[in-house]
Image (cartoon, rainbow, N blue to C red):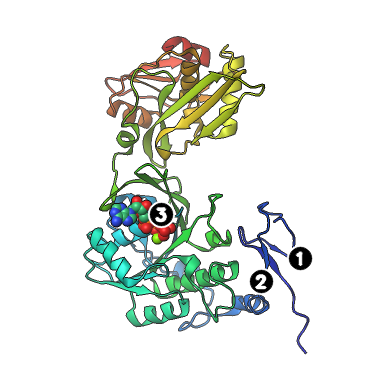
Amino acid sequence: MSPKAKRVFYCTECGNETPKWQGQCSACGAWNTIVEQPAELTAKGSASPRRTSPGRGLNRPKAIRDVETTDELRFNTGMAELDRVLGGGAVKGSLVLVGGAPGIGKSTLMLQICDSLCRFANVLYVSGEESQRQIKLRAERLKVRGEGLYLLSETNLDDVIESVNQLKPDVLIVDSIQTMYSGDGAASPGSVGQVKECAMALMQLAKGQGITVFVIGHINKEGSLAGPKVLEHMVDCVLYFEGEEHMSHRILRAAKNRFGATNEIGVFEMGDEGLTEVPNPSEALLSGRPQDTPGTCVTCVMEGARPVLAEIQALVVPSSYGNARRTSNGFDYNRAVLLLAVLEKRGGLMVNGCDAYLNVIGGLWVGEPAADLAAIIALASSFRDKNVPGDLAAVGEVGLTGELRSVNSLSQRLAEIQRLGFTKCLVPARSHGKVVAPAGLQLIRVHNIREALAAVL
Ligand SMILES: Nc1ncnc2c1ncn2[C@@H]1O[C@H](COP(=O)(O)OP(=O)(O)OP(=O)(O)O)[C@@H](O)[C@H]1O
Ligand SMILES: [Mg+2]
């Protein structure tokens, strides 16, 4: 007699499992997202760890000196910006997840890399969302030649694996993981069990046969990959494709990378003929910057090894209600509130009774404290309604006492600031290491925000 079947419930948003049904998920806080996992999937799920991949014997421990490392071959995808984010090209036999909001251009990006990939490799593009005809039309629009490119419109992963075994491609692209299902389809595609199962099968393809697999994943409105978080743990790289809906710039960001740094970004521009790379993001992000207007200041942030200039805009207006409103976009909200408090107490600007809005232009997310000083300058400039000189940039972390603290890679940042035609830069007076000011860039060294405000406003 079989033991009593264990009932398992899970959240369709975050994948958190609970032994009983509840209205709100205790992990992510979403309402009405807990559903019961089908019994057979639960039983199958518990048996899956013992499964060995087809065509492979039992894995045995190996001494580290005997493990061959030559397998970790990298190849260029033909898109330098993507290669940069992947840490210098795609790794053979790796599983890469590309996540992004609907319509951001995930399928476009993947189809475009096929153009160069299929010159030296066989590529299989599997779509569960579009017909072969639709993909071909898109490929024609994107001018993808596609000598060794094969298309498959399929949602059953078992059939996909069958095709892979026949075709033996070097690169497999799956669009998207949420449309695939494996087994008898008892659980609907996109459910936690299915996504896990499919990702596991694709992982085995990647590792077992040395196929580089790119998997597209949809993002829900909260910004995390729809379906289970567990997917992020299973794959080798997680790339997020981001951008403002009404802007043509797209930013590809590595959230996880087992083969390289995670703080690299790649910048693209979406046009009629698909995505074009933007090798010079600072220039693109600063284009259209308003001149002679209060409330804007430029800073330089490090995105991986690359310095990128960002424009921070602020609007400070007297509050008409009791509680002052604070909003930030592209800048950490709590950091913005803290900087406003420092500006009031240490800078002597009465911003407490004012509404304040902070915005980073171009869909960039600035998480670095090095942008603090530029935010302070932009806020103060808007409050006093005085322009910041157009050829001035600011770099520095602001402490709670209003002091300016040094930042890393200052010389690199200054070089980028000078390259983009700025002639003056506010920097912390004390900085570790020797700071080389590039020719033509005047450094204004300041100890605290009062000095900084006095110097520029
Ligand atoms: N015929 C066209 N001409 C110009 N641009 C187009 C055309 N079709 C699509 N696009 C652009 O491509 C974008 C959609 O790209 P794509 O289909 O690659 O996105 P996606 O992230 O794969 O979307 P989904 O989530 O629906 O799969 C559109 O937002 C649009 O900007
Ligand atoms: Mg798509």
Residue designated by label 1: 20
Quadrant occupied by the C terminus:
top left
* Residue 285 against residue 184 in the figure, above or below: above
Q: Residue furthest front?
A: 320
Question: x and y percent of residue 10 in the render?
Answer: 67, 64
Which residue is identified by label 3? 103
Determine whether 340 is above or below 20 in the image. above
User: Is the residue indicated by label 3 positioned so its CB lies within 8 Å of ligand 1?
Assistant: yes
Residue 453 image position (x, y, % from top left) = 48, 13
Q: Residue at x 35, y 71 (%)?
A: 131
Residue 414 as seen in the image, left or right of residue 319: left
Where residue 15 appears, x then y in whole percent?
Answer: 62, 61
Q: Would residue 432 be seen by someone viewing this image from the given angle? A: no
Q: CA distance from mark 1 to mark 2?
A: 11 Å
Please identify the quarter of the rendering in which residue 50 is found.
bottom right
Is the residue marked by circle 2 packed among few (<14), some (14-19), or many (20+) residues within 10 Å? some
Q: Nearer the viewer, residue 263 or 106?
A: 106
Question: Horizontally, is 56 left or right of 147 in the view?
Answer: right
Q: Which residue is mark 2?
A: 37
Measure how far apart labels 3 and 1 are at the Cα level.
Answer: 36 Å
Question: Distance of mark 3 from mark 2, alpha carbons?
Answer: 30 Å
Sequence order check: which comes first, mark 3 or mark 2?
A: 2
Residue 186 visible at all: yes
The amino acid pointed to by label 1 is: Lys
Q: Which of marks 1 and 3 precedes in the sequence?
A: 1
Seen in the picture, residue 324 relative to 274 is either above or below; the reply is: above
**Number of marks drawn:** 3
Q: Amino acid at mark 3?
A: Gly
- The residue type indicated by label 2 comes to Gln
Point out residue 97 in the picture as x, y percentages from the top left corner.
45, 60
- Give ligand 2's quarter of the image: bottom left
Regarding mark 1 in the picture, which secondary structure is present there? loop
